[in-house]
Protein backbone atom coordinates (compact mmCIF):
# COMPACT_ATOMS: atom_id res chain seq x y z
CA UNK A 1 0.00 0.00 0.00
CA UNK A 2 2.46 2.58 -1.17
CA UNK A 3 1.38 6.12 -0.30
CA UNK A 4 -2.22 5.01 0.17
CA UNK A 5 -4.20 5.24 3.33
CA UNK A 6 -5.43 1.87 4.44
CA UNK A 7 -9.13 1.37 5.01
CA UNK A 8 -8.91 -0.75 8.15
CA UNK A 9 -7.82 -0.24 11.76
CA UNK A 10 -5.57 -2.34 13.96
CA UNK A 11 -8.76 -3.63 15.61
CA UNK A 12 -10.10 -4.90 12.28
CA UNK A 13 -6.81 -6.71 11.69
CA UNK A 14 -6.62 -8.14 15.23
CA UNK A 15 -10.26 -9.21 15.33
CA UNK A 16 -10.82 -10.50 11.80
CA UNK A 17 -7.54 -12.42 11.74
CA UNK A 18 -8.59 -14.39 14.82
CA UNK A 19 -6.33 -12.51 17.23
CA UNK A 20 -3.60 -12.50 14.56
CA UNK A 21 -3.68 -16.31 14.10
CA UNK A 22 -4.60 -15.70 10.45
CA UNK A 23 -1.17 -14.16 9.92
CA UNK A 24 0.53 -17.52 10.51
CA UNK A 25 1.98 -18.25 7.07
CA UNK A 26 0.72 -21.83 6.72
CA UNK A 27 -2.88 -23.06 6.96
CA UNK A 28 -4.36 -19.82 8.35
CA UNK A 29 -7.90 -21.23 8.43
CA UNK A 30 -6.77 -24.22 10.45
CA UNK A 31 -4.77 -21.95 12.75
CA UNK A 32 -7.83 -19.75 13.32
CA UNK A 33 -10.04 -22.75 14.10
CA UNK A 34 -7.35 -24.19 16.38
CA UNK A 35 -6.99 -20.87 18.23
CA UNK A 36 -10.77 -20.72 18.75
CA UNK A 37 -10.88 -24.34 19.92
CA UNK A 38 -8.10 -23.73 22.44
CA UNK A 39 -9.82 -20.56 23.68
CA UNK A 40 -13.06 -22.53 24.12
CA UNK A 41 -11.26 -25.38 25.91
CA UNK A 42 -9.57 -22.93 28.33
CA UNK A 43 -12.95 -21.30 29.02
CA UNK A 44 -14.40 -24.79 29.66
CA UNK A 45 -11.87 -25.24 32.48
CA UNK A 46 -13.29 -22.23 34.35
CA UNK A 47 -16.97 -22.00 33.44
CA UNK A 48 -19.85 -24.29 34.37
CA UNK A 49 -21.18 -26.13 31.33
CA UNK A 50 -24.44 -24.16 31.00
CA UNK A 51 -22.55 -20.84 31.27
CA UNK A 52 -20.03 -22.09 28.70
CA UNK A 53 -22.85 -22.96 26.29
CA UNK A 54 -24.52 -19.57 26.68
CA UNK A 55 -21.21 -17.71 26.45
CA UNK A 56 -20.34 -19.63 23.27
CA UNK A 57 -23.72 -18.83 21.71
CA UNK A 58 -23.41 -15.14 22.60
CA UNK A 59 -19.86 -15.01 21.19
CA UNK A 60 -21.04 -16.65 17.96
CA UNK A 61 -23.68 -13.96 17.45
CA UNK A 62 -21.46 -11.05 18.54
CA UNK A 63 -18.41 -12.14 16.55
CA UNK A 64 -20.58 -12.66 13.46
CA UNK A 65 -22.20 -9.23 13.67
CA UNK A 66 -19.04 -7.33 14.63
CA UNK A 67 -16.92 -9.07 12.00
CA UNK A 68 -18.91 -7.98 8.94
CA UNK A 69 -17.78 -4.31 8.91
CA UNK A 70 -14.19 -5.36 9.70
CA UNK A 71 -14.16 -7.87 6.85
CA UNK A 72 -15.57 -5.30 4.43
CA UNK A 73 -12.83 -2.79 5.34
CA UNK A 74 -10.08 -5.41 5.10
CA UNK A 75 -11.32 -6.60 1.72
CA UNK A 76 -10.78 -3.09 0.34
CA UNK A 77 -7.04 -3.52 0.93
CA UNK A 78 -6.51 -7.30 0.97
CA UNK A 79 -8.95 -8.38 -1.76
CA UNK A 80 -12.06 -10.52 -1.65
CA UNK A 81 -12.20 -13.20 1.09
CA UNK A 82 -8.53 -12.89 2.10
CA UNK A 83 -7.00 -16.03 3.63
CA UNK A 84 -5.76 -14.03 6.65
CA UNK A 85 -9.36 -13.33 7.68
CA UNK A 86 -10.20 -16.29 9.92
CA UNK A 87 -12.90 -14.90 12.22
CA UNK A 88 -15.27 -17.01 10.11
CA UNK A 89 -13.36 -20.14 11.15
CA UNK A 90 -13.49 -18.97 14.77
CA UNK A 91 -17.29 -18.69 14.62
CA UNK A 92 -17.71 -21.91 12.65
CA UNK A 93 -15.76 -24.09 15.04
CA UNK A 94 -17.56 -22.54 18.02
CA UNK A 95 -20.84 -23.62 16.42
CA UNK A 96 -19.52 -27.20 16.25
CA UNK A 97 -18.33 -27.01 19.85
CA UNK A 98 -21.91 -26.38 20.98
CA UNK A 99 -22.40 -30.11 20.41
CA UNK A 100 -19.80 -31.15 22.98
CA UNK A 101 -21.63 -32.81 25.89
CA UNK A 102 -21.40 -31.71 29.52
CA UNK A 103 -18.70 -34.34 30.15
CA UNK A 104 -16.45 -32.15 27.95
CA UNK A 105 -14.78 -35.32 26.73
CA UNK A 106 -11.71 -34.39 24.69
CA UNK A 107 -12.80 -36.73 21.87
CA UNK A 108 -15.80 -34.53 21.16
CA UNK A 109 -13.64 -31.40 21.17
CA UNK A 110 -11.29 -32.97 18.62
CA UNK A 111 -14.27 -34.22 16.59
CA UNK A 112 -15.81 -30.73 16.55
CA UNK A 113 -12.55 -29.25 15.27
CA UNK A 114 -12.06 -31.99 12.65
CA UNK A 115 -15.67 -31.97 11.45
CA UNK A 116 -15.70 -28.21 11.08
CA UNK A 117 -12.46 -28.23 9.07
CA UNK A 118 -13.76 -31.11 6.92
CA UNK A 119 -17.00 -29.32 6.02
CA UNK A 120 -15.17 -26.00 5.59
CA UNK A 121 -12.69 -27.51 3.15
CA UNK A 122 -15.04 -29.85 1.24
CA UNK A 123 -17.91 -27.30 1.16
CA UNK A 124 -20.83 -29.70 0.54
CA UNK A 125 -24.55 -29.04 0.16
CA UNK A 126 -24.70 -25.31 -0.38
CA UNK A 127 -21.66 -24.25 1.65
CA UNK A 128 -19.83 -23.01 -1.45
CA UNK A 129 -22.96 -21.17 -2.58
CA UNK A 130 -22.88 -19.12 0.64
CA UNK A 131 -19.57 -17.58 -0.44
CA UNK A 132 -21.41 -15.63 -3.14
CA UNK A 133 -23.35 -13.53 -0.64
CA UNK A 134 -21.90 -9.98 -0.85
CA UNK A 135 -20.66 -7.39 1.63
CA UNK A 136 -18.68 -9.59 4.01
CA UNK A 137 -21.60 -11.90 4.75
CA UNK A 138 -20.42 -14.56 2.30
CA UNK A 139 -17.12 -14.84 4.15
CA UNK A 140 -19.05 -15.66 7.34
CA UNK A 141 -22.01 -17.65 6.03
CA UNK A 142 -20.09 -20.51 4.42
CA UNK A 143 -18.28 -21.21 7.70
CA UNK A 144 -21.47 -20.82 9.71
CA UNK A 145 -23.09 -23.48 7.52
CA UNK A 146 -20.00 -25.72 7.78
CA UNK A 147 -20.23 -25.32 11.57
CA UNK A 148 -23.92 -26.24 11.53
CA UNK A 149 -23.16 -29.38 9.51
CA UNK A 150 -20.46 -30.38 11.98
CA UNK A 151 -22.79 -29.68 14.91
CA UNK A 152 -25.49 -31.83 13.28
CA UNK A 153 -23.06 -34.76 12.91
CA UNK A 154 -22.00 -34.51 16.57
CA UNK A 155 -25.60 -34.30 17.79
CA UNK A 156 -26.60 -37.21 15.56
CA UNK A 157 -23.72 -39.28 16.92
CA UNK A 158 -24.69 -38.41 20.49
CA UNK A 159 -28.31 -39.35 19.77
CA UNK A 160 -27.31 -42.70 18.20
CA UNK A 161 -25.05 -43.73 21.09
CA UNK A 162 -27.67 -42.60 23.61
Image (cartoon, rainbow, N blue to C red):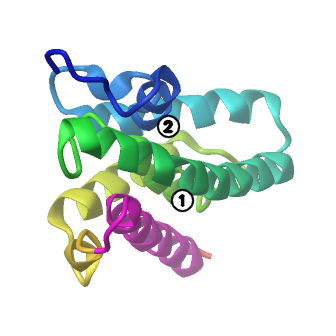
- Mark 2 and mark 1: span between their CA atoms? 11 Å
Q: Residue at position x 25%, y 68% from top? A: 131
Pointers 2 and 1 in contact (C-beta within 8 Å): no
Q: Mark 2 or mark 1: which comes first in sequence?
A: 2
Say the numbered circle drawn on residue 37: 2
Membership of 156 in magenta stretch: yes
Q: Is residue 20 above or below residue 127?
A: above
Residue 102: x %, y % from top left: 74, 53
The boundaries of the magenta stretch are 133-161
Residue at the farthest top position: 3
Q: Quadrant of residue 46?
A: top right
Q: Quadrant of the C terminus?
A: bottom right
Residue 96: x %, y % from top left: 50, 59
Q: Is residue 102 left or right of residue 36?
A: right
Per the image, label 1 sits on a secondary structure element best described as helix
Q: Which residue is mark 1?
A: 95
User: Is residue 89 something one can see in this rendering?
Assistant: no
| Residue 116 or residue 144, whichever sits in front | 144
Classed neighbour count for the residue bearing mark 2: other residues with Cα under 10 Å, few (<14), some (14–19), many (≥20): many
Classed neighbour count for the residue bearing mark 1: other residues with Cα under 10 Å, few (<14), some (14–19), many (≥20): many
Q: Residue at position x 56%, y 71% from top? A: 158
Residue 139: x %, y % from top left: 33, 58
Residue 3: x %, y % from top left: 18, 15
Q: Is residue 36 left or right of residue 28?
A: right
Q: Quadrant of residue 124?
A: bottom left
Residue at the farthest bottom position: 125
Q: Main secondary structure of the magenta part?
A: helix
Per the image, label 2 sits on a secondary structure element best described as helix
Membership of 126 in magenta stretch: no
Say the numbered circle drawn on residue 40: none
Q: Quadrant of the N terminus?
A: top left
Amino acid sequence: MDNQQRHYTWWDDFFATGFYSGHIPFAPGTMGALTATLMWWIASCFLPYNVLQWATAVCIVLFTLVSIPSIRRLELDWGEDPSRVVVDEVVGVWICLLGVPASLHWGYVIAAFALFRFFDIVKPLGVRRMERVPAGWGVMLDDILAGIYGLAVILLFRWIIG
